[in-house]
Amino acid sequence: MIIDCHGHYTTAPRQHEGWRTQQIEAHTAGKPPPPRPTMTDDEIRETIVGGQLKVQRERGTDLTIFSPRAAGMGHHLGDATTSEAWASACNELIHRVCSLFPKNFIGVGMLPQSARVSPQNCIAEIGRCVNEYGFVGVNLNPDPSGGHWQDPPLSDHYWYPVYEKMVEYDIPAMIHVSASCNPAFHTTGSHYLSGDTTGFNQLMTSSVFKDFPTIKFIIPHGGGAVPYHWGRFRGLAQDAKLGLLSDIVLKNIFFDTCVYHLPGQELLAKVIPVDNIIFASEMIGAVRGVDPETGHHYDDTKRYIDQLPLSAADKAKIFEGNARRVYGRLSGVIEKQFAQAG
Ligand SMILES: [Zn+2]
């Protein structure tokens, strides 16, 4: 089975994001939000059949670990109340997709975060995602202020309520920022990659893995700048007397393969142990074009893995085994959803 651990519902029915705009407008005007829009199963089916499912089939992947649109999380907009209602709406929609296509999608939840609001606020939604929806992970935004970095670093006890739940439920978090509201950062270019790199650095220098030895994080987008600068991080860890970087982070941190060219993928596989790499494409996402050098979509990352000089057993780890290990609930949920599908 080929499991893509990083996909977002970027093709949701238009009324879903339309409601979000109305919700934020109402909040700004000091009014209550309008009622949530209706979306039929057929409308949802249509967005998937012609979208992510079509791409899965074309590329020969089987299952996508699927979460709400990342840039759409918008934790910098509104307040704790609007974030809660929006996260709830987005996660419910992901659950509907997974129920309609149980063999192709398994859910990951977004969290009702807000800048400078305690992540304690996320606990109820994490419980709902795991217990009611059968989700296998969460996306954790290290910068709910959208490019202004106003919250404490991930090393801070501020985040520990979320970490406690991750360990309790055996779910990993993907460190994933949302849209940038700071014009200095392009959302999917610099903001995403700096969020990945920053999150890694915050965790690497923290006590989080001492306090939560079994916790697991996925750094998306190939780890941002981390694998390319592995020597720098090794040296920083050494200078700070933290020990060997591989000893500090590799039980707890994993990198996805959302790197959109072969040389980048080769570097990732050369620097990071195979056990710490999880296949992902983030389709249909930030980069949708065709690479004129190859004639294939940039985000068709399976092609790059296929070309790596690795054994079949190592490729199987990247495509399936590591995802099943890092997402502790995944194998159980696969079994359950496949049984439902018949
Ligand atoms: Zn993403």
Image: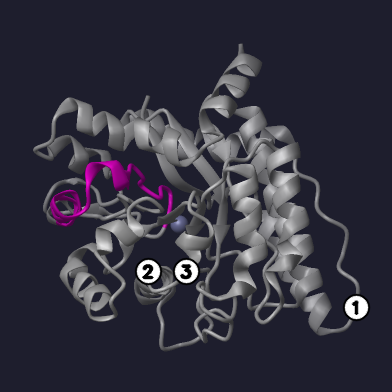
Seen as rendered, the residue at the extreme top is 342
Q: Nearer the viewer, mark 3 or mark 1?
A: 3
Q: Which residues are magenta?
A: 264-285
Query: Where residue 204 sits in the image (x, y, percent)?
Result: 37, 69
Of the four image quadrants, the one with ligand 1 is bottom left
Disc 1 marks which amino acid?
Answer: Lys
Quarter of the picture holding the N terminus: top left
User: 188 or 131: which is nearer to us?
Assistant: 131
Query: In terms of secondary structure, where does tag 2 sit?
Result: helix
First in residue order: circle 3 vs circle 1:
1
Q: Residue at x 20, y 66 (%)?
A: 230
Residue at the spot of label 2: 204
Query: Where residue 26 sits in the image (x, y, percent)?
Result: 83, 76
Relative to 123, is 114 above or below?
Answer: below
Q: Residue at x 52, y 49 (%)?
A: 172
Q: Whole-Å distance between the Cαs marked 3 and 1?
A: 43 Å
Which label belongs to residue 207? 3
What is the quadrant of residue 23 in the picture? bottom right
Query: In terms of secondary structure, where does tag 1 sit?
Result: loop
Local crowd size for mark 2, using a 10 Å CA cut-off: few (<14), some (14–19), many (≥20): many
Residue at the spot of label 1: 31
Query: Where residue 149 sits in the image (x, y, percent)?
Result: 52, 84
Q: Residue at x 68, y 53 (%)?
A: 90
Query: Would you say the beta carbon of the disc 3 residue lies within 8 angstroms of ligand 1?
Result: no
Disc 2 marks which amino acid?
Answer: Met
User: 30 or 83: which is nearer to us?
Assistant: 83
Instruction: Judge whether residue 198 is colored magenta.
Output: no
Q: Whole-Å distance between the Cαs marked 3 and 2?
A: 8 Å
First in residue order: circle 1 vs circle 2:
1
> Is residue 187 among the parts visible in the rendering?
yes
Residue 98 in the figure: left or right of residue 327: right
Q: Residue at x 17, y 57 (%)?
A: 264
